[in-house]
Image (cartoon, grey):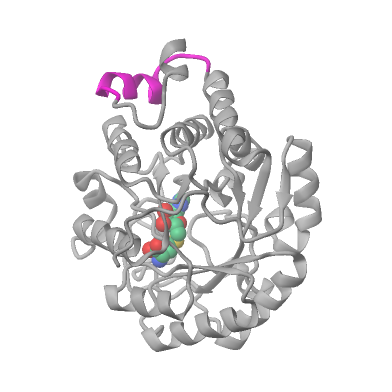
Amino acid sequence: MKDLIDSLPADRELSDGEWRFLIEGDYDRQRLYDRADRVRRQYYGTDVYIRGLIEISSYCKNDCLYCGIRRSNAKADRYRLSKEEICACCEQGYGLGFRTFVLQGGEDAVHTTEWVAEVVLAIKEKYPDCALTLSLGERPRRDYEIWYRAGADRYLLRHESASCVHYGKLHPPAQTFARRMECLRDLRRIGYQTGAGFMVGSPFQETEDMIADMRFLQEFQPHMVGIGPFIPHHDTPFANFPQGTLERTLTMVALTRLTVPNALIPATTALGTIHPGGRELGLKAGANVVMPNLSPAAVRGQYSLYDNKLCTGEEAAESIAGLDRRIRAAGYQITVGRGDALTEWNDKEQ
Ligand code: SAH
């Protein structure tokens, strides 16, 4: 077993049995986390990158079975930020030291290609030294291209599950695995730093599905990988499923660090939600990014993807000093700057 952890270079093909053991086997997890931490230090030292997360709309035309802002949830309080409100968030975030802004939202039918492009242009014009990340779901390739040309640098679109069958159990038939993958490939080819990722412990997820996730990450080599535990939302069909565990989530974060060594991996809000020290534990298991909430305080509670989602305390961007203290106590430090992925991939179409 020792050999398996120590010999896990990113390009090694593991058998199903080896992956299965690493994911669910009975061994000392601390050794896995420590090894992931060593690899993260080789690439990124002890720096932690910060991203200001602005949740721009809770309207969504999709119906992901796990998500609290799904279309069918008639009880969800909905809001949508204006361009001016989004720019005000950036202004506040810039003052706090953020040099990456992430605009995330439901798939809001009111967000036209042109409107998003205008927002991107406005932010990049005012903050040319900042990176802009979009996370607005599946869109036609043309939209991704227009937003890239307007100045967007990165795009987060979790693959959710690399197993077609499992993906189908998490989504209605109209949302297909093939389309999700096509979007991810489009984003990469256009030139975005591209983020994939998945939930740990989502309903019906088997170890084989997570093996598929790891193999997908190994092959796709995303620039960013978001991994958090599934947490039920009371107004969804998955309300009564158990949440993902801390240990399994940390295991998948650590295995991801070993599989995609130069990836930007956030210690996610969901990880912080299931355990008071979740964020720090994520960092110690290979994560190197945190994404505090920069949304206007008045709407934060309404972007309710799952129950009890953190948006106050150190999860709030304005508490960055407290967050920095906690991160320092864990042995790392926040770094100001865009925090781009270390390697520029060469698959951009000419
Ligand atoms: N519409 C965008 C943003 C989705 S919300 C998109 O499609 O990419 C961001 C992420 O939150 C999702 O990708 C999903 O992995 C995660 N999420 C949604 N519901 C969740 C839940 N109940 N528990 C944990 N994570 C959840």
Q: Residue at 33% of width from left, 61% of height from top?
A: 348
Q: Residue at 70% of width from left, 77% of height from top?
A: 91
In the displayed orientation, state which residue is furthest to the front. 350
In the image, is residue 189 above or below residue 265?
A: below
Q: Which residues are magenta?
A: 14-28
In the image, is residue 18 above or below residue 205?
A: above
In the image, is residue 242 above or below residue 308?
A: above
Residue 177: give x, y in percent of width and height: 22, 55
Specify the quadrant that holds the C terminus: bottom left
Residue 222: give x, y in percent of width and height: 39, 49
Left or right relative to 266: residue 192:
left
Magenta span main SS: helix
Does residue 22 show up magenta in the picture?
Answer: yes
Left or right relative to 41: residue 110:
left
**Looking at the image, can residue 234 be seen?**
no
Q: Residue at 62% of width from left, 69% of height from top?
A: 130
Q: Quadrant of residue 89?
A: bottom right
Left or right relative to 38: residue 332:
right
In the image, is residue 189 above or below residue 6?
A: below
Q: Report the image quarter containing ligand 1.
A: bottom left
Q: Residue at 32% of width from left, 19% of height from top?
A: 18
Q: Nearer the viewer, residue 24 or 89?
A: 89
How many dots with numbers?
Answer: 0
Q: Nearer the viewer, residue 146 or 251?
A: 146
Residue 142: give x, y in percent of width and height: 29, 78
Residue 320: give x, y in percent of width and height: 76, 57
